[in-house]
Structure formats: structure tokens, C-alpha cells
Image (cartoon, rainbow, N blue to C red):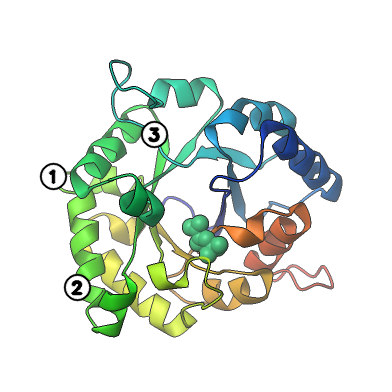
Amino acid sequence: MTSTKPLVVANWKMHKTAFEAIAFVRELLTLDPDCRHVDAVICPPFTALAAVHDALGVSPVELGAQTMWYADSGAFTGEISPRMLLESGVRWVVLGHSERRQYCGEVDETINRKIRAALAHGITPIVAVGDTPSEHAAGITLDRVAEQTRAAFDGMIADEVARCVVAYEPIWAIGSGQIDSPEDANAVMREIRGAVPGLDRTRILYGGSVEPASIRRLVAQPNIDGALVGGASLEASSFVALLDEAQGRALSGQASM
Ligand code: PEP
């Protein structure tokens, strides 16, 4: 595995102007998050990336983007390249988020190209896969998620795949307040790990209505290595609570990892 530390990724989606993002980081730095036993990444909108990078300074919290294009430059109106992200201090990128698949026409083939481009530039892809409510209801989650995972990493060798992170996000759990049970999520992640050579060495995150109160039970599962978090990452205090809980710190401040 690339790292044994849990990884907590804040996906801010289309929330926060650069001004609001800086205010978040200032509050975060005041709270002085303990990142000794957890890796932390914030993914703001493109327009706030440079500002968040500057505001984070030497903080151990790292910067991610919510998507990117696969070419270095060219006639791709409205898109952002890996080189542009690197210039803004980005080291991680979420690819294939279900909202981009649903609203922006993202398909497996472009996700695959984006993963390869991110790796070629030294940016760690966080590859999102997940089942729809109807797939969940039909009981085909394992097949569907394994199929999506194989398509995302199609043609890649195990050592490349091992440099990525996967996020399993049941679509019915995103933003719904309806979290998957840690045991069920762990079973899906076990399936993902076995779907493609190299994923036995990666971190696999759970995403979907994760809160500070639920993250610890999730990361206690053998196949859950952290979380991709939307709503509960938008307040600095809640983000710090997620980091504390993910690294097994009781509210008393006792480290258990
Ligand atoms: C997400 O944005 O990927 C997500 C999981 O959102 P939320 O935590 O709000 O469900």
C-alpha cells in the first residue's frame, strides 16, 4: 500500500469563493489540526486553488482538484490541464466523481485517460466509483462497481494502479444522510481491491454522508482506508473533527494509533 495512514479528502464541490476558502483555511490553521497519523487533502473549486495553496503555507494539509482534463494544452474550452493544476500546487485530483458522470458526460474512457495523465504528471488520482440507487436495489452493486473499476484502470500495469486511490461512493448515499453500513461498504471495497491487479496496494476510501460521528467506525474496517467527504468538510471545525476521528483520536486527545 502507498501509505498505511488513513486519508481524508474534502470535496467542496461548487462551494466557496476564493475569499470564503481563505477564511476556512485561516480558521483551520487556528485549530492546528494534528496530521501525524492521517493524510488530509482539500479539493476546492478551481478558482480557489491558488488562494488555498498560498493560505495553507507549510500546513501538512495538501491540495487537490475536483477534476481535470487529460491533455497538457489545446483546444479544450473551459478545461484545466494537469500542468495548470501543478502550477497551482495541486498534488491530488478526484476523477470520475458521480456528479461529473451524471451532469458533465464523464465516461469510463475519458476517466481512464485522465488517470494516466495525472500519473504522468505526478498527481495522485482519486478515482471515484459507485452504484446507483436502482443498481443497489437490484442487488448488483458488486458487479457494477467491479466493472467500473476495471474500465477506469483498463490497460494499466499493476505498479501504475498501485499509485492511485479509489473512492467507493454509493450514489444513493451522497448528500442523502443515508450512510452505507461499514460492513457492507467494506465488502464492496474488498471486491474493488480484487478487481484489478495493484489495488491490493492502494488506499480505498468510502464516500457518502460521512460525518465525524461515523468516520471512525468506517476506517476500523480492514478495507476502508479513509473517506471522501462533501458536506461535513465545509466547516473547518468539522473537517478537523473528521481528521481526529479518522486517526483514532478520542475526544480526550488520546492517540490510539
Ligand atoms: C462527495 O462529495 O463525494 C460526498 C461523498 O458528499 P457527501 O459527504 O456530502 O455525501
Mark 2 lies within 8 Å of ligand 1 (Cβ measured)? no
Tell me, yes or no, if residue 157 can be seen here: no
- Residue 88 in picture, x, y percent from top left: 55, 24
Q: Residue at x 39, y 34 (%)?
A: 68
Circle 2 residue: 143
Q: Residue at x 82, y 45 (%)?
A: 27
- Amino acid type at image mark 1: Gly
Circle 1 residue: 155
Q: Say which label, 3 or 2, has the lower sequence index.
A: 3
Q: Say which label, 1 or 3, has the lower sequence index.
A: 3
- Amino acid type at image mark 2: Asp
Residue 182 higher or lower than 212, as above or below: below
> Which secondary structure, mark 2?
helix
Q: Residue at x 74, y 67 (%)?
A: 255
> Which secondary structure, mark 3?
loop
Circle 3 residue: 68
Q: CA distance from mark 1 to mark 3?
A: 20 Å
Task: Give the left or right position of residue 250, taking residue 183 as reference.
Answer: right
Quarter-of-image position of residue 199:
bottom left
Quarter-of-image position of residue 134:
bottom left
- Residue 131 in picture, x, y percent from top left: 31, 69
